[in-house]
Image (spheres, helix red, strand yellow):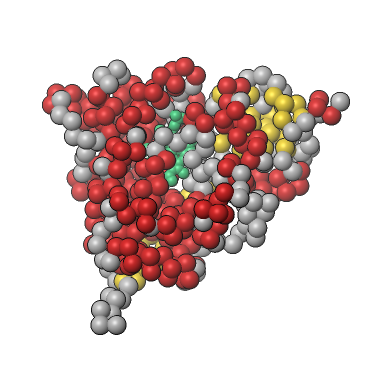
């Protein structure tokens, strides 16, 4: 019977070793499998059975409709070394309980209060930039989003206050990326984790002592008074990690894409001039910065910071006329889905025009899922959109950037999709608009 078939796929087993060698190509590997075998592809990674699903209906099925049939499973066990039982790593009823406690802190109305802080941090970055200087845009955006997350989470000015901490977080993030692939915990990580824990517990203690609602996420998480300090630590660390590098990557790829597409850059700048006329953007401007948002959407289509989502099936799972046995790792990949020519003709082409309302409504919802979906959907999605658009609007009003000649651009798909060699770019201050004209 057709419905009892095992999905097709490459017969050659991918060994753990060959995958680490080809990790630089894991996105191309998935692309190739989707092209060759279609919407349901089975393969072996070492001894693990893996199935890759490449259809928006199946993405929705796994993340939303039949999510109860899956857990996040093994890879998350390793991430727990940094994140404990935070939202990203916990499972089942405990996850649901924590999600309900944290949700109000991320309500759109509360998040709106962060708009000004975001624009101010972006303006601060701009004030450090010099015309003609060459910077690593990936570092610049990482530093900026670190400042934003410190401010919105802890009302702390870590950016100014602590290069040492920024360094510790950068190391922890590097480790967090590596820990997903390498089982050994290093001594270095233990030290970094201890340093971070000390800081986070100190900030929580201080806040509990003062009892002061500072309007940041920590105050909101404390408001419920339902979490132990350890639970708080895990959630704060999780938000810090999840809410910082993802946004930085999205922004870096956006700068890169704009540098390659002067017509889109000009159109976006035209919108910024018309809507903002030189002032800093605020929350109320978001609705009018439609093209800027389209640029950011298209950037996360081509370079989705979260490029693959993995789940483990708890029981036999029927999909597309195939049976996927219990214990299989099921993958859905934003990188692959977002490049599917059925939904994105000429998929490699950068075209913000794909994000007009009409164009969006002509596609299935889960042909685009940079923030996942269902009960595990990114809790910071509204904040990420706001941050992406406001940072670009603030900086691109005054600045263009050009890729340094000869700088290699390549993706590095770890937990997030980073630029492998950073992003060396030359800054160019835009000419003042001619007021007489
Ligand atoms: C462009 C930026 C971002 C992208 C692309 C992104 C992407 C994602 C994705 C794909 C997931 C789901 C993972 C899965 O289902 O396995 C997720 C979960 C999560 N994200 Fe984000 N994220 C971004 C920004 C943020 C921000 C700004 C925050 C917090 C301030 C945040 C906090 C979280 C948390 C806590 C989870 C776990 C949610 C849960 O399982 O209940 N993210 N994110």
- Residue 183 at what x, y percent from top left? 51, 30
Q: From this viewpoint, which residue is outermost toward the left? A: 210
**Quarter in which the C terminus is drawn:** bottom left
Looking at the rendered structure, the number of numbered marks drawn on it comes to: 0
- Mark yes or no: residue 352 visible: yes
Q: Please tell me which residue is depicted at 25% across the width and 24% down the height of the picture.
A: 222
Eyeballing the image, is 165 above or below 89? below
Q: Please tell me which residue is depicted at 34% across the width and 34% down the height of the picture.
A: 107
Q: Nearer the viewer, residue 316 or 266?
A: 266
Instruction: Give left or right: position of 77 versus 144.
Output: right
Ligand 1, by image quadrant, is top left
Q: Which of 185 and 392 is in front in this view?
A: 392
**Quarter in which the N terminus is drawn:** top right
Instruction: Give left or right: position of 269 versus 69.
Output: left
Eyeballing the image, is 26 above or below 153? below
Q: In which quarter of the image is residue 401?
A: bottom left
- Mark yes or no: residue 22 visible: no
- Residue 377 at what x, y percent from top left? 48, 34
- Residue 242 at what x, y percent from top left? 40, 38
Q: From this viewpoint, which residue is outermost toward the right? A: 1
Instruction: Give left or right: position of 121 versus 417.
Output: left
Q: Nearer the viewer, residue 255 or 370?
A: 370
Q: Quadrant of residue 316?
A: top right
Q: Please tell me which residue is depicted at 28% across the width and 75% down the height of the picture.
A: 432
Q: Please tell me which residue is depicted at 57% across the width and 42% down the height of the picture.
A: 365
- Residue 50 at what x, y percent from top left? 67, 32
Q: Nearer the viewer, residue 52 or 201?
A: 52
């Amino acid at each position: 019977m057709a419905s009892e078939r095992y999905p097709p796929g490459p017969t050659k087993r991918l060994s753990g070793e060959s995958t680490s060698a080809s990790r630089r190509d894991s996105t191309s590997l998935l692309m190739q499998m989707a092209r060759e075998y279609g919407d349901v592809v089975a393969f072996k990674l070492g001894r693990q059975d893996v199935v890759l699903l490449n259809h928006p209906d199946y993405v929705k099925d796994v993340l939303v409709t039949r999510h109860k049939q899956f857990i996040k499973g093994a890879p998350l066990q390793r991430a727990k070394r940094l994140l404990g039982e935070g939202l990203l790593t916990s499972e089942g009823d405990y996850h649901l309980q924590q999600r309900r406690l944290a949700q109000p802190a991320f309500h759109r109305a509360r998040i709106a209060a962060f708009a000004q802080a975001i624009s101010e941090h972006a303006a601060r970055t701009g004030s450090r930039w010099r015309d003609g200087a060459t910077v690593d845009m990936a570092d610049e955006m990482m530093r900026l989003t670190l400042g934003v997350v410190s401010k919105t989470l802890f009302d702390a000015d870590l950016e100014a206050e602590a290069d040492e901490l920024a360094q510790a977080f950068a190391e922890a993030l590097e480790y967090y990326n590596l820990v997903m692939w390498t089982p050994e915990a290093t001594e270095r990580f233990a030290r970094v984790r201890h340093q971070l824990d000390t800081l986070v517990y100190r900030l929580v203690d201080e806040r509990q002592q003062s009892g002061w609602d500072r309007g940041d996420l920590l105050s909101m998480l404390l408001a419920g008074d339902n979490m132990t300090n350890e639970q708080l630590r895990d959630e704060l660390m999780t938000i810090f990690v999840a809410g910082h590098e993802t946004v930085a990557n999205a922004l870096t790829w956006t700068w890169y894409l704009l540098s390659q597409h002067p017509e889109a850059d000009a159109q976006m700048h035209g919108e910024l001039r018309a809507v903002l006329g030189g002032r800093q953007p605020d929350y109320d401007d978001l609705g009018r910065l439609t093209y800027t948002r389209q640029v950011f959407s298209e950037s996360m289509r081509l370079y989705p910071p979260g490029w693959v989502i993995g789940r483990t099936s708890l029981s036999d799972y029927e999909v597309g006329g195939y049976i996927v046995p219990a214990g299989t790792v099921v993958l859905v990949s934003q990188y692959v889905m977002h490049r599917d020519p059925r939904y994105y003709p000429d998929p490699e082409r950068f075209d913000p025009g794909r994000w007009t309302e009409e164009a969006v409504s002509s596609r299935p919802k889960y042909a685009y899922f940079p923030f996942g979906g269902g009960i595990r959907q990114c809790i910071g999605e509204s904040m990420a959109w706001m941050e992406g658009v406001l940072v670009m609007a603030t900086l691109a009003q005054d600045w263009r950037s050009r890729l340094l000649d000869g700088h290699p651009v390549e993706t590095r798909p770890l937990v997030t999709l980073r630029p492998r060699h950073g992003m060396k770019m030359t800054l160019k201050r835009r000419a003042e608009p001619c007021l007489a004209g």
